[in-house]
Image (spheres, helix red, strand yellow):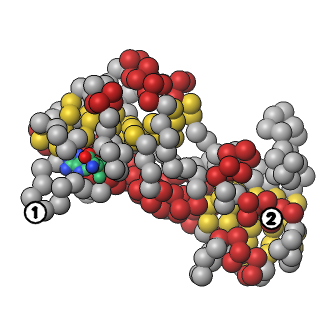
């Protein structure tokens, strides 16, 4: 059993601890390193976010820190706040050497702070959407950079959340989390199979806007007011017919030049800013 694999409820909060770790063979350090593997992340229900900015975003979003790792001797006001927040949440604080941080983040230029958090992924079968919310559905998204970028863009336009449909890359993988730049803590995530999505779609009162290279409608000619789900296709194959049939509108972003399609994250960004056009204003 992994050391951080504690029962979720109703166990009392563990006594807060703060310790200095200097050895790579420390069991907790080994366990955090093992979170680099999807299987381990899923079993433990945990993930790693690197950097003080992401940790601060998590605190702002009300995400309790399970384990906070920071470089020994590091002193910054934001770090002191993160340490205090970890203690309040009953988490552990580990002070480590630069060498250990390097191994934990597997980067040439490692961050000086790493946070471990519990994953939040809502089952599609229980997802309810209220109000004028804007959601994004991603069909079998493969690339972690695309997924993280889409989560970040969803956050930027004030979308409520992202639904992962079918077999997708892990939103809690380190590459995806990095690409979100902290937005993973501000956007809801739900997941389910294509069949579960089609079932959920029957309960969704808003319109589903699909994007397709064979779409007959210009994406700028559609009314996006009201609850909307933007449905995007897989990077290689696009949307399959069964998902196309679930769309109320099937739109295309017109292109010139020789490119036959846009990158998934770019196409999602173009769509989201058009859909949120009336919801976004620069402050006076
Ligand atoms: N070979 C795939 C196909 O034929 O659909 C290309 C997929 S494209 C790289 C990934 C997704 O981005 C598409 O499924 C669609 O959702 C969206 N997309 C990319 N370019 C688009 C465009 N010009 N108009 C509408 N959607 C686009």
Secondary structure type for disc 2: helix
Residue 230 placement (x, y as % from top left): 31, 38
SS class, disc 1: loop
Residue sitting nearer the eye, 101 or 185: 101
Judge left or right: residue 246 versus residue 196: left
Residue at 41 percent of width and 18 percent of height: 203
In the rendered structure, the answer to whether residue 281 lies left or right of residue 73 reads: left
- Estimate how packed mark 2 is, as few (under 14), some (14 to 19) or many (20 or more) residues with alpha carbons within 10 Å: some
**x%, y% of residue 112?**
66, 75
The mark found on residue 203 in the picture is none
Residue 64 seen from this side: no
Corner quadrant of residue 173 = bottom right
Q: Looking at this view, name the residue that lies furthest to the right.
A: 15
Q: Look at 40% across and 40% down and name the residue there.
A: 139
Residue 188 drawn at (x, y percent): 51, 41
Q: Where is residue 201 in the image (x, y as percent from the top left)?
A: 39, 23
Q: Residues within 10 Å of mark 1 (few under 14, many from 20)?
A: few
Q: Which residue does the image show at 23% across and 41% down from the upper left?
A: 212
**Which residue in the rendered view is the most extreme toward the left?**
256
Q: Quadrant of the C terminus?
A: bottom left
Measuring 29% from the left and 30% from the top, which residue is drawn there? 241
What residue does disc 1 label? 257
Q: Mark 2 points at which residue?
A: 30
Q: In which quarter of the image is residue 131?
A: top left
């Amino acid at each position: 059993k992994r050391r951080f694999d504690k029962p979720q409820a109703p166990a009392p909060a563990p006594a807060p601890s703060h310790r200095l770790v200097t050895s790579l063979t420390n069991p907790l350090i080994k366990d955090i390193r093992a979170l680099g593997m999807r299987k381990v992340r899923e079993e433990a229900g945990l993930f790693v976010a690197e950097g003080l900015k992401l940790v601060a975003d998590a605190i702002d979003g009300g995400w309790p820190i399970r384990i906070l790792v920071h470089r020994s001797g590091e002193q910054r006001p934001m770090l002191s706040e993160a340490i205090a927040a970890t203690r309040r949440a009953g988490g552990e604080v580990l002070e480590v050497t630069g060498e250990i941080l390097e191994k934990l983040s597997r980067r040439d230029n490692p961050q000086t702070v790493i946070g471990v958090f519990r994953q939040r992924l809502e089952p599609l079968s229980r997802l309810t959407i209220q109000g004028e919310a804007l959601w994004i559905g991603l069909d079998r998204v493969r690339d972690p950079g695309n997924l993280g970028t889409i989560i970040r863009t969803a956050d930027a336009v004030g979308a409520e959340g992202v639904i992962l449909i079918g077999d997708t890359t892990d939103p809690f993988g380190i590459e995806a989390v990095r690409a979100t730049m902290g937005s993973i803590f501000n956007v809801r995530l739900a997941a389910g199979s294509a069949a579960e999505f089609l079932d959920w779609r029957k309960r969704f009162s808003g319109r589903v806007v699909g994007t397709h290279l064979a779409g007959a409608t210009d994406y700028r000619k559609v009314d996006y007011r009201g609850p909307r789900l933007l449905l995007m296709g897989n990077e290689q194959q696009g949307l399959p017919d069964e998902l196309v049939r679930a769309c109320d509108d099937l739109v295309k972003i017109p292109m010139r030049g020789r490119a036959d399609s846009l990158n998934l994250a770019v196409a999602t960004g173009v769509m989201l800013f058009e859909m949120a056009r009336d919801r976004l204003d620069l402050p006076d």
